Amino acid sequence: MKHISGKEVVKKLVRLGYGKVRQRGSHVRLEKFDGKQTRKITVPIHRELHPKTLGSILKAAGISKKEFLEK
């Protein structure tokens, strides 16, 4: 997977139904209610996210890498 910025991740998550709740410094908080629970995700707004950080964000969001890359 190519390197991706925090801003790009936020844009893609918003397209997938997440809403921006707040921003504190360089971190954005996103939330989405999926019928059973509210998924809460914090994304650091860095120029380049570490692949493991991106993997953790996608796991918390319940999104596959394939689904994420298609958006």
Image: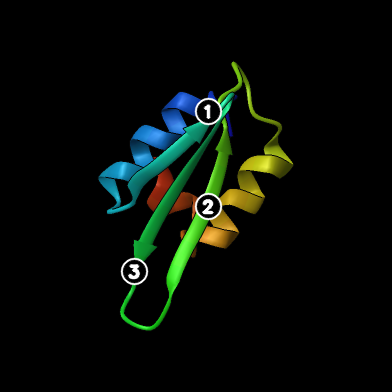
* CA–CA distance in space, label 3 to label 2: 12 Å
| Residue beneath disc 1 | 6
Q: Residue at x 69, y 41 (%)?
A: 53
| Mark 2: secondary structure | strand
Q: Residue at x 26, y 44 (%)?
A: 15
Residue 55 place in picture, x, y as percent: 64, 49
Count residues near mark 3 (Cα–Cα under 10 Å), then give few for <14, some for 14-19, many for 20+. few
| Residue beneath disc 3 | 33
Count residues near mark 2 (Cα–Cα under 10 Å), then give few for <14, some for 14-19, many for 20+. many
| Outermost residue toward the top in this view | 47
User: In the image, 54: left or right of 18?
Assistant: right
Q: Residue at x 42, y 36 (%)?
A: 10
- Amino acid at pointer 2: Ile
| Residue beneath disc 2 | 41
Residue 58 place in picture, x, y as percent: 54, 53
Residue 18 place in picture, x, y as percent: 33, 51
Residue 47, compared with residue 56, is above or below; it is: above
